[in-house]
Image (spheres, rainbow, N blue to C red):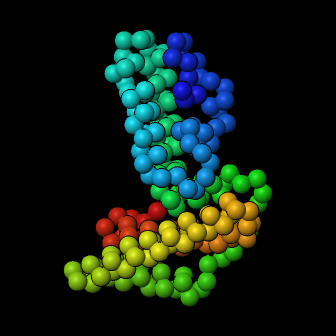
C-alpha cells in the first residue's frame, strides 16, 4: 500500500527517492491534515515496518524495513507539528517566496524574554511565562490554519503571512524550550 520497498526482494521503489514527507506517508499535500489521520498512518506504517515482522525474512528485507522506518520517522517529524508542516509545505512550493524580516520590536521582545529566562525566574513567574508562551503558540497555530486556508484557496499573498507566522513560532518554541531547561535550537 505504501511505495517504500518490495516486500519480496527488498528493492526500494524508485519513486521513493523523490518523495515528499507527505508522499512517503501517503497523506495529501495540504496543511489541513487532522492529527488523527497522521496518527492512523503512523500506526499502519509501524505495524508494516516493525522489526519483528521482518526478522525471519532475511537480512536484506530486515535492513530495508529499518531504513524505511527511519525514512517514515523523518517524514513524520516534518508534518506532525503544524509549524514544521508549514515549513515543509513552503519548501515544496515551486516558486521562490519572499521572506520578509520580522519586526524589530518583536525581535527585541524575544531577546528580552530569553535574557529574563537565563537570569532566572521564580516559580510563579515561570508558570505565568509558560502560560503566555502556550497562548502565543496556540494563537499562531490558529492564524496559521486561517492563512493556509487562504493560500490553498489561491491567495498567493498568504504565503508571506505563513512564513512570518512560522518564523515567529520558532522564537516562541525556543522560549518554551528554555523554560523547560533545554537549549533552544
Q: Position of residue 108 (x, y in %)?
A: 52, 86
Q: In this view, does 32 lie to the left or right of 93?
A: left
**Residue 31, picture quadrant:** bottom right
Q: Is residue 129 above or below residue 91?
A: below
| Image x and y of residue 159, in percent | 68, 66
Find the residue positioned furthest to the front: 153
- For the view shown, which residue lies furthest in the bottom direction? 105
Q: Can residue 69 be seen in this view?
A: yes
Query: In the picture, residue 115 is in which quadrant?
Result: bottom left
Question: Is 38 drawn above or below residue 96 in the view shown?
Answer: above
Q: Nearer the viewer, residue 173 or 37?
A: 37
Q: Which residue appears farthest toward the left when viewing the image? A: 123
- Residue ID at (61%, 72%): 164
Please, is residue 177 above or below residue 29 in the view? below
Residue 99 shows up from this direction? no
Tell me the residue at 51%/36% (across/down). 71
Residue 54 versus residue 121: which sits nearer the camera?
54
Q: Which residue is drawn at 62% across and 24% down?
A: 13
Residue 43, x across and y down, in percent = 39, 37
Q: How many labels does the image show?
A: 0
Pick the front one: 13 or 183:
13
Q: Residue at x 41, y 82 (%)?
A: 113
Left or right? Give the position of 4 relative to 41.
right
Amino acid at each position: 500500500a505504501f511505495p517504500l520497498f518490495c516486500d519480496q526482494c527488498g528493492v526500494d521503489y524508485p519513486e521513493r527517492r523523490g518523495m515528499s514527507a507527505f508522499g512517503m506517508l501517503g497523506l495529501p499535500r495540504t496543511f489541513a491534515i487532522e492529527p488523527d489521520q497522521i496518527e492512523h498512518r503512523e500506526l499502519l506504517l509501524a505495524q508494516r515496518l516493525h522489526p519483528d515482522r521482518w526478522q525471519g525474512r532475511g537480512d536484506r528485507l530486515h535492513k530495508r524495513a529499518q531504513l524505511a522506518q527511519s525514512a517514515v520517522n523523518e517524514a513524520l517529524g516534518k508534518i506532525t507539528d503544524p509549524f514544521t508542516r508549514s515549513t515543509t509545505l513552503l519548501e515544496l512550493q515551486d516558486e521562490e517566496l519572499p521572506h520578509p524580516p520580522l519586526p524589530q520590536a518583536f525581535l527585541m521582545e524575544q531577546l528580552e524574554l530569553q535574557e529574563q529566562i537565563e537570569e532566572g525566574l521564580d516559580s510563579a513567574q515561570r508558570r505565568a511565562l509558560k502560560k503566555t508562551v502556550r497562548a502565543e503558540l496556540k494563537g499562531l497555530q490558529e492564524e496559521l490554519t486561517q492563512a493556509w486556508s487562504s493560500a490553498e484557496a489561491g491567495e498567493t499573498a498568504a504565503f508571506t503571512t505563513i512564513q512570518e507566522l512560522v518564523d515567529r513560532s520558532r522564537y516562541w518554541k525556543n522560549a518554551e524550550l528554555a523554560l523547560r531547561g533545554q537549549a533552544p535550537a
